[in-house]
Image (spheres, rainbow, N blue to C red):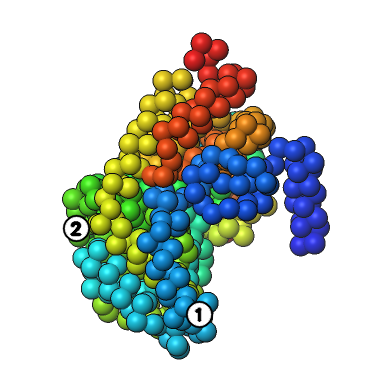
Amino acid sequence: MTTYLERIEQQVQMMHMLQATGLSTYSREVSSSCGPIMRVEGKEKINFISNSYMGFSTHPKVVAAAKQALDEYGVGIGGSPLACGTTVLHQKLAEHIAAHYGKEACLIFASGYQALAGSIQGMLGKQDMALLDSLDHRSSVDGCILAGCKVRSFVHNNLDDLAELVQNTAGHKGHRMVIVDSVYSMDGDLAPLPGIQRICRPAQVTILIDEAHSLGVIGRTGKGLLEHFDLPNGADIISGTFSKFAGAVGGFTVADRDVIDYLRHYSSPFVFSASIPPAIVAAVQASFDLLTSEPEWHERLWSNVRFLLDGFKSMGFDTGKSETPVIPIMVRDTEKVLRMNRALLDRGVFALPVIHPGVPLKMERIRLGVMATHSREHLEKALEIFREVGRELGLIPDSA
Amino acid sequence: MNTITKEQLRADLVRIIGTLTNLKPTDVQDWQRLREDLGLDSLQSLELLCRINDKYMLDLGMEDVMDLQTVDQVANQLFLFVQNGGN
């Protein structure tokens, strides 16, 4: 049995060995805003590493709203939401998000992670059971650990497996809740919500969806997965984050008023965290407003997604099942994916290598986040760099 | 005393691992380690145990199997549990 200090030493040694090879590109130093071009260790790179799909974090209206709130409220509000941390800005944003999803009420959390983990922890107890998609975000798993509930999982997006699981757990005495990501963060595919509803509704299984990568992105006007499938009542509880579509920080949960009022007092991450600063709340509110006042960003995002996906596919890259701004370039080899990312970074593309256990074995990939603010020139240059590197590593034919 | 054979139990184990990992049963070998070679994460490992419990009406916890690494080790230990009625 190794001690915790020995385990730490083993892992740190492995990390140092990886860093010594020059292949690790994690946590590079950034000295610019999160625009389509980022300055990484002093050099400009095309940004494909962020989740700021709409590029709103640098939009002049968003920055102006944040500055105004900063002048009025200072850098923070100095307490948790139950104390002095619920300003008129927090209240207005919560009402806006509830209306956005057609729900009665909303809670604003300090992060998307806390929104999901804290809502699960607050809702479920030891007698209850969570049914997780096998690729759910870590915050769902950690929420279940905090809740102490029973956990079962079904094969990713496999409705037959979910139906079997719902049937096999029908005798469970506590409450059951299925928890899925609307868009899966590493593969960019969607949760099959109509099928999930068909299975869960008759069995009285509550549906919780995580809108982290879909809010602002999916659906005709960017309202998310419910709009995409035209299922306004497709979920009972909806959590999400402000770090993706708004490129900021913070999270939310919407549901019936009783559920929200309950979580307000029983979700530990909500009760015991300081509120997000009013300047951030104002920026997020301005980002929501942009979804309706400047719909061209949504159109530009999808035009960029189509252009990039077509470009990669025509060269012979494997982009998995993605149908969203999350685009994986499947490499299926740990060393090769690290070498590829190093080569991409050296030539001007800032992307994220994802290896096991972040993804299953043989599913290692470069993960790209497309932005509405990428110009066609950025995308063409990136494709050319991918073509060079892909040929050198034998991922695509020389003729590509 | 349960009458299941070790071969039947191994076949069930391999089928469940294949379902959870999207591997063909023929690609799952006795010597393979669940985490390092087959890529099962903690959630999948827990689900594997739950499905075995469901199948054989056992009540095993993670502490009963956490020292087991390979498919063969898990199959052998499960066979002993089933033979002993889950004790």
> Measuring 76% from the left and 56% from the top, which residue is drawn there?
A7
Answer few, some or many: residues within 10 Å of disc 2's Cα (few below 14, many 20 plus, some between 14 and 19): few
Residues at marks 2 and 1 touching, judged by CB atoms closer than 8 Å = no
What residue type is disc 1 on? Gly
What residue type is disc 2 on? Pro
Question: Residue most toward the top?
Answer: A399
- Image: A115 above or below A219: below
- Image: A338 above or below A235: above
Classify residue B67 as left or right of residue B9: right
Quarter where residue A132 is shown = bottom left
Task: Give the mark, 2 or 1, whose residue is nearer the N terminus.
Answer: 1
Judging depth in this view, the residue of A71 and A213 nearest the camera is A71
> Measuring 45% from the left and 47% from the top, which residue is drawn there?
A185
Judging depth in this view, the residue of A60 and A245 nearest the camera is A60
Residue marked by disc 2: A232
Q: Chain of mark 2?
A: A
Q: How many marks?
A: 2
Query: In the rendered image, which quarter contains the N terminus of chain A?
Result: bottom right
- Image: B85 above or below A102: above
Classify residue A90 as left or right of residue A70: left
> Which tag is nearer the camera, tag 2 or tag 1?
1
Q: CA distance from mark 2 to mark 1?
A: 38 Å
- Image: A226 above or below A280: above
- Residue A74 got which mark? 1
> Measuring 41% from the left and 33% from the top, which residue is drawn there?
A376
Mark 2 element type: loop
